[in-house]
Amino acid sequence: MKIIRTATIPLSLNVLLTGQLRFLANYHEVIAVSSDGDQLDEVREREKVRTIAIAMERGISPIKDLISLFKLYDQFKKEKPDIVHSITPKAGLLTMLAGKMAGVPIRMHTFTWLIIPSKQGLLQKLLIKMDQLLCWAATNIYPEGKGVKDDLIAYKITSKPLKILANGNVNGIDLEYFSKKNISIDQQNQLKYKLGISDFDFVFVFVGRLVGDKGINELVAAFSQICNPDDYRDANSQICKLLLVGPFESELDPLKAETLQEIELNPNIISVGFQKDVRPYFAIANCLAFPSYREGFPNVIMQAGAMGLPSIVSNINGCNEIVIEGENGTIIPVKNVDALQQTMKKMIEDKEYYNKLKANARPMIQSRYEQSVVWNALLEEYKRLLKEKEIEFKPCTKTT
C-alpha cells in the first residue's frame, strides 16, 4: 500500500509526526510531501521514508497556490497512492483537491486546529469557504480533539462524519523520550547555574512562540505582579522565575512594547530563545504556564506533563481536554491577567495543592496519550478504510 502524508511546511512533518512515519513504513510505503527545507531532509533521514518537495504557501496566494495544486496533481498521478493524508490547512486544501482530481480513492485530512474562530468579517467567510471546499474534496475528516470537532460543527464546515482517533492527538507522546530521568542531576544543576536559577526558586516555564496570541503579554504582566525585580519572595523565601523557551516573531504577532521591556529588564524573567531539545528546561521547572488564546491540541502540555509538570492553561480547545481542573493542572479564562496571577501565586504557596497536581501529571498523560496508542489507532483506521474500498492490504516487508 502506498500512503502520501502532506504538510505545508517541513517543520510540521518533522515535529508533529516524529516517529510516526517510520512506524507506518513498517506496514506501508510512505512518502512525505511538503515545501523544501532542511527539516524535510531530517524527516527523510530519521523516518527512513521517501520525501518530495513541493512549494506551498502558508498564506493565501492564488497564483502560487494554483501552481502547487497542479504539482501535487502531477505527483499523485505519477505515484498512484491508495491514501493521501494531510495535516495542515493549506496542504489540506491543496492535497484534497489534487487527490480528488487525480482519483486517489482515500483522501484524509486531520484538522489540528481552526483559525476561523479568531477571525472576523470577509476573511472569516473566506476561510470558512476554503475549509468547506477542503471537506467536500476529502473522503474522511478527522478533528484532532473534541474542541476542534465542535468548531467544525459550529461553523457548519461539513455534514460528513467527524471521527476523533484515539484520545485526540495527532501523534501522542513518547514517554521514554519525555521523561525527567533522561536529564541527569548534573545536567540540571549545570543548566540552573548557567541561567542563574537556585534550588530554592519556583520556576514557571513557557515553551512556544513568544507572540501575542500565545498569551505572553498576560503571562509577563501576571508574573511581574507576583515576582518583581525587587526579588519578591513568598512565605517560604522562594524567588519566582519565569523561563521563556521559544523565538520572538515580531513580524507576525509582536508583543506589546511594555511586555518586551519587562522581559528585558526583569532579572527574574529568563528568555533563552528557540531550543531544539526542550526537555532540560522542563526538568528544571516547577510548572508550565500556557495561557494561549487558541490551540488545536498542544503538544507542549503533554510534553510538560510527561516530564512531571502540572500546567496552568487557558480555557480553549485542546488545553481544556488535556488538563483536568484540580487534577493535573488548572484552567483559567482567556486573557485574564488577574486569574493567571492568582493561580500562579497559589501554585507557589499552596504546597499540598501543587504536590497533588505534580503527582498526577505524568500518570494522566501516560493513561491517555501514550504514543503507541495513537499510532496503532491510525494504522487500524488505514486498514479499515482500505478494506472498505476493497483494496487488498499487504503489509510492507521493509524493515526500518
Image (cartoon, rainbow, N blue to C red):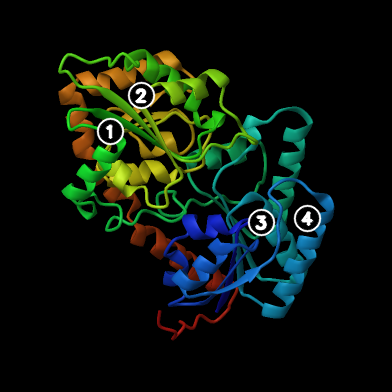
Distance, label 1 to label 3, CA atoms, is 43 Å
Q: Give the labeled residue for mark 3.
A: 91
Residue type at the position of mark 3? Ala
Of labels 2 and 4, earlier in sequence is 4
**Badge 1 local density, few (<14 within 10 Å), some, or many (20+)?**
few
Q: Give the labeled residue for mark 4.
A: 65
Of labels 3 and 2, earlier in sequence is 3
* Secondary-structure class at tag 1: loop
**Badge 3 local density, few (<14 within 10 Å), some, or many (20+)?**
many
Mark 3 touching mark 2, by CB under 8 A? no
Vertical order, 324 against 274 (above or below):
above
Residue type at the position of mark 1? Gly
User: Which residue is found at the position 44% from the left and 16% from the top?
Assistant: 337
Classify residue 259 as left or right of residue 175: right
Camera-side residue: 87 or 194?
194
Picture coordinates of residue 86, whole percent (x, y): 60, 59
Location of residue 172 (image quadrant): bottom left
- Is residue 333 visible in this depiction of the protein? no
User: Which residue is found at the position 42% from the left and 70% from the top?
Assistant: 23
* Secondary-structure class at tag 4: helix
Q: Give the labeled residue for mark 2.
A: 267
Classify residue 90 as left or right of residue 24: right
Vertical order, 16 against 221 (above or below):
below
Mark 1 touching mark 2, by CB under 8 A? yes
Q: Give the labeled residue for mark 1.
A: 196
